[in-house]
Amino acid sequence: MNKTALTFESDIVTNYDFEITIVDLYTLNTSITIHHTESSKSVVLDLIRQGYLGATPEEPSIAISLCTLELYHRIRRRKASFSAEAFAKVICDLYKLEDEPPLKFS
């Protein structure tokens, strides 16, 4: 390897913590700190290990708890007409948001 490649590899940070915005109806927390280690394959897998699903497959900026998703799934199994819009409004109510940021459903 050339000298530049060695310098670049030594500058890579492999262990770090990051904070992410979350939605968790059981705790009502708004953020969580996730630890990323050298053995971690991706940030998304780190989130899953902590019980959260990122909103995007790469570099998510928000995550929802798996327990919250399970609750939505169980409600929909019992009452199929319960909409994602209604669930979003419940989340806003519990987090004391007044459609902030604006939610647009149509």
Image: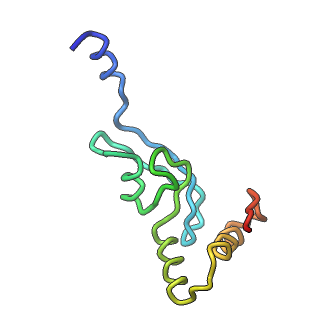
Residue at figure coordinates x 65%, y 70% from the top left: 88
Residue at figure coordinates x 45%, y 51% from the top left: 57
Residue 3 appears at what percent x and percent y?
Answer: 27, 10
Asked if residue 15 lies left or right of residue 86, the reply is: left
Vertical position of residue 5 compared to residue 96: above or below: above
Residue 56 appears at what percent x and percent y?
Answer: 50, 52
Asked if residue 53 lies left or right of residue 100, the reply is: left
Residue at figure coordinates x 31%, y 45% from the top left: 41
Vertical position of residue 20 compared to residue 102: above or below: above
Q: Quadrant of the C terminus?
A: bottom right
Give the residue at the far left of this rendering: 1
- Report the coloring of the rendering: rainbow
Vertical position of residue 16 compared to residue 43: above or below: above
Give the residue at the far top of this rendering: 3
Q: Quadrant of the N terminus?
A: top left
Residue 11 appears at what percent x and percent y?
Answer: 36, 22
Residue at figure coordinates x 70%, y 72% from the top left: 89
Asked if residue 44 lies left or right of residue 71, the reply is: left
Residue 13 appears at what percent x and percent y?
Answer: 37, 30
